[in-house]
Image (tube, grey):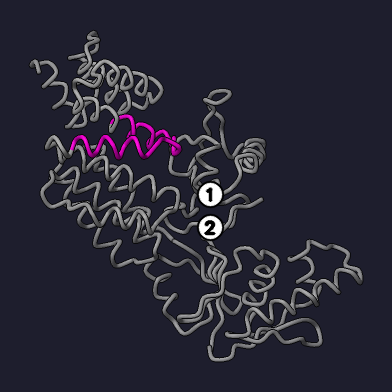
Amino acid sequence: MDSLITAAGQALAAGDPLGALKRVALRDDPPALALRGIAMAQLGDFARAKDLVKRAARAFGAKEPVARARCIVAEAEIALVSRDLHWPSKTLDAARRTLDAHGDRLNAAYGGYLDVRRLLLIGRLDEAERKLGALDPAPFPPALRTAHALVVMGIAMRRLHARTARTALADAQRAARLAGIPALTAEVDSASRLLNAPAARLIARGDERPLLLDEVEELQHSKAIVIDACRHVVRHRKIELSLATRPVLFTLARALGETWPADVARETLLARAFRARHADGSHRARLRVEMGRLRKLLAPLADVKATRHGFVLAPRMAREVVVLARPVEEEHAAVLALLSDGESWSSSALALALGASQRSVQRTLETLAVNNKVQPLGRGRARRWTSPSLPGLATMLLLPPSLPDH
C-alpha cells in the first residue's frame, strides 16, 4: 500500500474526509475507490459512496478476499446510515467470517456492530442483545468501544433500563474523548440529549407532568396500575395485559384511567372510542359490548363498573391508576419519530421498522407531506423522506409503538 493510500486511510480514521479526498480524488485503483467511497459517505453523498465502494469490491475480486470483505462492511455501513434496512445481512455475515479468518478482527467486529444497530432500528431487541453479547469491546480502539457503548445504551433505553443506559452513556463519553473524532463526539452528545429529554407524560387524577426515562422505569415497578399508551399495554407489577391488537378497548381503558377515580360519561366514551358525534342506539349497544370485553380482559387487575352517568375503573389490589403517554401526542407519531433522527428513510425501510405494509406507510407519508411535516427527496425507487425533529417527540429508540397507525 503506497503512502497516499496510507495517509488517506489515516485521515478517514480521524474523521477528515476532505483530507482523504485530497490524496486519492483522482485515482481509480481499487484501494482509492474504496477510500473515496468512505469519504463520500462521511460527507453525506450516500448514492455516490455506494457506487464507489461497489466498484472497489468488484475490482478487488476473489483474489483479494480481505480487501473485498472490507468493502462489503463499508457498503453495509452506508446502507445503515442511508436507512437501506433491506440490505442482505447474510452478505455481511460472510464478509465478517472472511475478515475473522484472515486475522482482521477489528473490521469483523465493526461489521458485527453494524448488524446489531440494524436489528436495533427495526426493533428486534432479543436478537440484537444476543449478537451484542458475542462482541467483546475490550481489545479494540476507543472508536469501536464508543460504538459498543452506544448500542448498549440504545438497547437499555428500549428496555426502559435507565441505570444501564446511563452507565453505557458514561462509557461512550470516555471512549469518545479518547478517540478524538468530532463526528463520534457529536453522536455521543446527541445520545446524551436524548437520554436526558422527557421520555413520557404521566397522567394521574386529572393532572399531567413529564417523566424522564429513570422515572418511567420507576413507574413500571410501582404498585399502581399503569395504562401504557406508548406500548398499548395495561400492567400491574408482574401482570401485563396487551391491548396492542385491540385499539377500541385500549382507548376505553385509557379514558377510564385518565379520569380515575372519577367515572367517565358514556357520551365521552362514545366520542373517543367510536368518534360518534351524535350517538344512537347502535352506538350505545356497541359500547356495552366493548365494555363487557374490557371488563373480562382487565378482570385480573380491576373491575369496570357501570355508574349512573357512565363507567368507572375499580382496582382490585392497586391503590392508584395512572396513564403513561408520549411526551407529544402527534398523529402518525410512529413515522415521525423514526424520521426525527435526521436521516432520510425510504418507505420500505419505514415499513420494515414499523412492521406495517409499505402502502400504509406511503399513505401516511403523503398525508404528512401535505401538512409540511415531512419532505420527499428524489423520485421513484430512489425517493427518500426526511423530517425536522419535533420538540418533545420521543424517538423510536426510546419508546417504540406496539402497532403503527393504519
**Residue shown at 37% from the left, 69% from the top:** 214
**From the viewer's perspective, is 308 left or right of 117?**
right
Residue 84 rendering spot, x and y as whole percentages: 44, 35
Q: Is residue 90 magenta?
A: yes
Assign the N terminus to one quadrant of the image.
top left
Counting from the top left corner in percent of width and height, residue 93 is at 30, 40
- Picture quarter containing residue 320? bottom right
Residue type at the position of mark 2: Pro
Q: Residue reaching furthest front? A: 62
Element class at badge 2: loop
Residue 354 numbered tag = 1
Q: Residues within 10 Å of mark 1 (few under 14, many from 20)?
A: many
Towards the viewer: 226 or 71: 71
Residue located at (11% from left, 37% from top):
103
- Residue 162: assigned label: none
> What residue lies at 47% left-to-right and 59% top-to-bottom?
399
- Per the image, the residue denoted by label 2 is 401
Rendered view: 73 above or below 139: above
What SS does tag 1 mark? helix
Q: Is the stretch drawn in magenta largely helix, strand or loop?
A: helix
User: Mark 2 or mark 1: which comes first in sequence?
Assistant: 1
Q: Magenta includes 327? A: no
**Mark 2 → mark 1, Cα distance in angstroms:** 8 Å
Query: Quarter-wise, where is residue 68 in the image?
Result: top left
Please tell me whether residue 376 is drawn above or below residue 320 in the rendered image.
above
Task: Give the foreground label among 2 and 1.
Answer: 1
Does residue 141 appear left or right of residue 369 in this picture? left
Tell me the amino acid under the disc marked 1: Leu
Q: Residue 386: x and y, percent?
A: 51, 36
Is label 2 in contact with label 1 (beta carbons under 8 Å)?
yes
**The magenta segment:** 74-99
